[in-house]
Image (cartoon, helix red, strand yellow):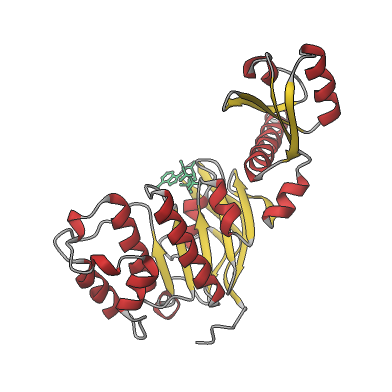
Amino acid sequence: MDRSDRSTLATLRGVHKQYGAVHALRGMELSLRGGELLALLGPNGAGKTTAIALLLGLLRADQGEVALFGRDPQDIVARRHIGVMLQDAQLPPTLTVGELLRQGASYYPAPREVGACAVVAGVDDLLRRRYGKLSGGQQRRVQFALALVGNPRLLFLDEPTVGLDLQSRQGLWRAIRQLVAEGCGVVLTTHYLEEAEALADRVCVMAGGRIVSEGSVDALRARVAIKRVRCRSRVGAEEAAAWPEVVEAGIEGGHLWIATARLEDLLRRLLAADAGLDGLEVRAAGLAEAFTEITNAARADAARAEAALEEAA
Ligand SMILES: Nc1ncnc2c1ncn2[C@@H]1O[C@H](COP(=O)(O)OP(=O)(O)OP(=O)(O)O)[C@@H](O)[C@H]1O
């Protein structure tokens, strides 16, 4: 397998998927290349799990095209080149970590060396321990090692760092970066926006069963003309949140913070409400504010489209 190959690994084209009356995907488009980490973000119910289940061959699309290495995702030849770390992994608790990894490796024609996987995942000191006796964070790292044993060209990581402490999380991030540098493609779903910010080459934001925004973290941030204002003020977060210029407001470390798309109007109003405020800081929005803005806009669009349909009916 050519690891420097940057060709397309996975695609969804015009994909629709319904569960009874629920439209989980409505015209989903996605593609991923080798050496690229794509973060799939979106609120609960956006369709992320469904999109991944289609790529893993666990579900069939009602309409549209799904391809893994140019093949049907249910084709065994395609499946041999993927690694998967899902949220609700159930592994036999009485096996040791070493036994689990060797068993996993035995399913693949060209596995990665078990010891090397253990080192990359930071579980090389746990190989003789029984899986069921490990902490939740240690089990998560073993699941990551297991996702690597097949030497995958494409890795699916579903909320990989939930339950990990800061050090383990950063260790996993380093391991993921190393795999991407080696040419592996990664699809990451996460609710930690700082995780997407730290790792992703490309971020796709899903809402209502389709991609509503796509680009690099910087491009998404720039597309949203949101600034984050921070100051010490007697204005409360609830009062500020009700102002028309304000996207979101809160209190953090004794400071009022406000996300706004209309900076000058907000500053005028803020100073009128509290001329004595101090410690004022303004910075460009992070991915978190961009995400809130993009998903709010997508929800408003969907509500408008539904209202128009109802009116026409
Ligand atoms: N097996 C199922 N039967 C019926 N409806 C389902 C099923 N699986 C998912 N859905 C519905 O499809 C929609 C998309 O769900 P999906 O799990 O793909 O979203 P998600 O973005 O992964 O959400 P989360 O962030 O909560 O995991 C939701 O409305 C969900 O309720």
Q: Is residue 130 above or below residue 190?
A: below
Q: Position of residue 158 (x, y in %)?
A: 44, 55
Tell me, yes or no, if residue 53 can be seen here: no
Residue positioned 65% across, 35% down in the render: 299
Q: Is residue 209 above or below residue 138?
A: above
Residue positioned 50% across, 50% down in the render: 190
Q: Quadrant of residue 264?
A: top right
Q: Quadrant of residue 122?
A: bottom left
Task: Give the left or right position of residue 74, taking residue 5 as reference.
Answer: left
Q: Is residue 219 above or below residue 110?
A: above
Task: Give the left or right position of residue 85, taking residue 136 as reference.
Answer: right
Q: Is residue 249 above or below residue 61?
A: above
Residue positioned 61% across, 25% down in the render: 250
Tell me, yes or no, if residue 204 can be seen here: yes
Residue positioned 46% across, 67% down in the render: 175
Q: Position of residue 306 (x, y in %)?
A: 67, 33
Q: Position of residue 207 (x, y in %)?
A: 60, 44
Q: Position of residue 119 (x, y in %)?
A: 35, 72
Check the picture and name the quadrant holding the C terminus.
top right
Residue at the left extreme of this rendering: 94
Viewer-closest of 111 and 212: 111
